[in-house]
Image (tube, rainbow, N blue to C red):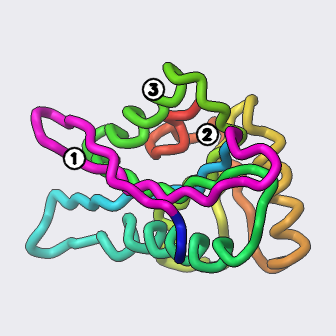
Amino acid sequence: YGLDSEIKHFTMQGYDCQNVVATQTGTVNPAQYWIICGHLDSISPYTQTDAPGADDNGSGSAAVMEAARIMSQYEFEYSVLYILWGGEEQGLYGSAHFADSAATAGTDILGVVNLDMIFYGPTPDDQAELHYNTASTNLGVAFDAISDTYVPALEKVIASPPVSASDHSSFW
């Protein structure tokens, strides 16, 4: 899609793993970032009978790529990072490595939209679960308002307390 992209390596339990990062540079504030992300890996304790990878997290990975495809056609004031994490199922390794490195470097991350299991079944399939902490309340409220405007049938479930078992929590 014409974006600068790279593979960022990190070590997870002695293994070489990767995050895939594509950057859309902002026009006014290129050193401030929004992140749209999901994780690439999947896991199942019952690999012969239960393979949830299409949902967890093929659905989120595909949505990140679709966001990059559509959004890359526009210009934004801030930079946008489209990131696919490795090592989420083993303990958020990819996002934790990235978030720790960003914090050490003083990277200005404005917000993170994490897409994990976005086509989760069973029904109802018109429901979105929002997880945000106090620092990201404005982002959660904005998502709620935007979805009311553009997808009024979408029921939002505000997770309280928010779940920290996905990559968004690495940035909290």
Which stretch appears magenta? 4-32
**Residue sitting at x 74%, y 30%:** 135
- Residue 118 on image: x %, y %: 53, 69
Taking the magenta stretch, the answer to whether it contains residue 11 is yes
**Residue sitting at x 49%, y 19%:** 104
- The quarter of the picture where residue 106 lies is top right
- Residue 94 on image: x %, y %: 35, 42
**Which residue position is annotated with label 3?**
100
Identify the mark nearer the N-term, 2 or 3: 3
Residue 54 vs residue 159, the one in the foreground: 54
Do tag 1 and tag 2 residues touch (Cβ < 8 Å)? no
Q: CA distance from mark 3 to mark 1?
A: 16 Å
**Residue sitting at x 45%, y 26%:** 100
- Determine crowd level at label 3: few under 14, some 14-19, many 20+ residues with C-alpha closer than 10 A: few
**Residue sitting at x 44%, y 28%:** 101
Q: CA distance from mark 2 to mark 3?
A: 21 Å
Q: Amino acid at mark 2?
A: Pro
Judge whether 84 appears above or below 112 on screen.
Answer: below
**Which residue position is annotated with label 2?**
162
Judge whether 106 appears above or below 170 on screen.
Answer: above
Q: CA distance from mark 1 to mark 2?
A: 28 Å
